[in-house]
Amino acid sequence: MSSHPSDTDNEKLEQLVSLMRGLGTRTVLYQQNVAASLGLYDNDLKSVDILRETGPITAGELSKITGLATGSITALVDRLEKVGYVRRQNDPHDRRRVIIVPQYEHKEEVSGTYRPLHTAMIELASTYSGEELELITAFIGKASAIMEQQIRSLHAERGKTSS
């Protein structure tokens, strides 16, 4: 046997990282196609998904998360409000602040667009045992946390170079 277990493990780890990068690329391409099918810009749909995760947030918070300038966020929220995906609401604790409230989740065009992917992913996930699903879920959760950290790091670096 010419292969050492550590070499094999390293190859498997590299293959996993490569597959995850490819999944990330396909996710971005999928989101671009979903956005186009809904008549939205990519950043509009990304913001819609961010709001799905965070719930109501201020325009400033959305600007920080997306890296978009506040003027771009204002135009983005205007577009999303016009099609009924969000609404603006005064912050009950600070009337000067406006909170962006998502309201698109139950729109048929949104749920209908995601339904085939949701169904296919449920079908795929159902081929795994409960224990395997726990492991996969934990891995994806930890991988997402690493991505968040990397996003913050890149954002901080970008801030240093633009100063």
Image (cartoon, grey):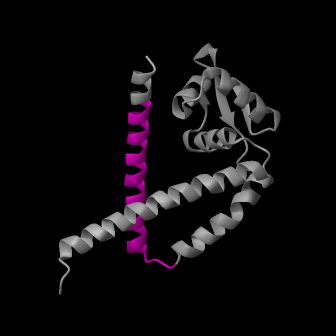
**Is residue 158 highlighted in magenta?**
no
Q: Quadrant of the C terminus?
A: top left
Q: Residue at x 63, y 38 (%)?
A: 47
Residue 14 appears left or right of 48: left
Place residue 158 in its image quadrant. top left
Q: Is residue 87 above or below residue 145?
A: above
Q: Residue at x 75, y 43 (%)?
A: 40
Where the N terminus falls, by quadrant? bottom left
Residue shown at the point (79%, 53%) measured from the top left:
109
In the picture shown, does residue 115 fall above or below 141? Answer: below
Residue placed furthest toward the front: 2
Of helix, strand and loop, which mostly describes the magenta segment?
helix
Q: Residue furthest right?
A: 82
Q: Position of residue 94 (x, y in %)?
A: 59, 14
Q: Up-down: is 148 above or below 14?
A: above
In the image, taking residue 136 as reference, residue 68 lies left or right, namely right
- Residue nearest the viewer, comparing 144 with 91: 144
- Whether residue 91 appears in this view of the structure is no
Extreme residue in the bottom direction:
1
Residue segment shown in magenta: 127-155
Residue 13's image quarter?
Answer: bottom left
Relative to residue 81, is residue 29 drawn left or right? left
**Residue 127: image x %, image y %?**
51, 79
Query: Front-most of 104 and 78?
Result: 78
Residue 141 position, x and y percent, is 41, 54
Quadrant position of residue 93: top right
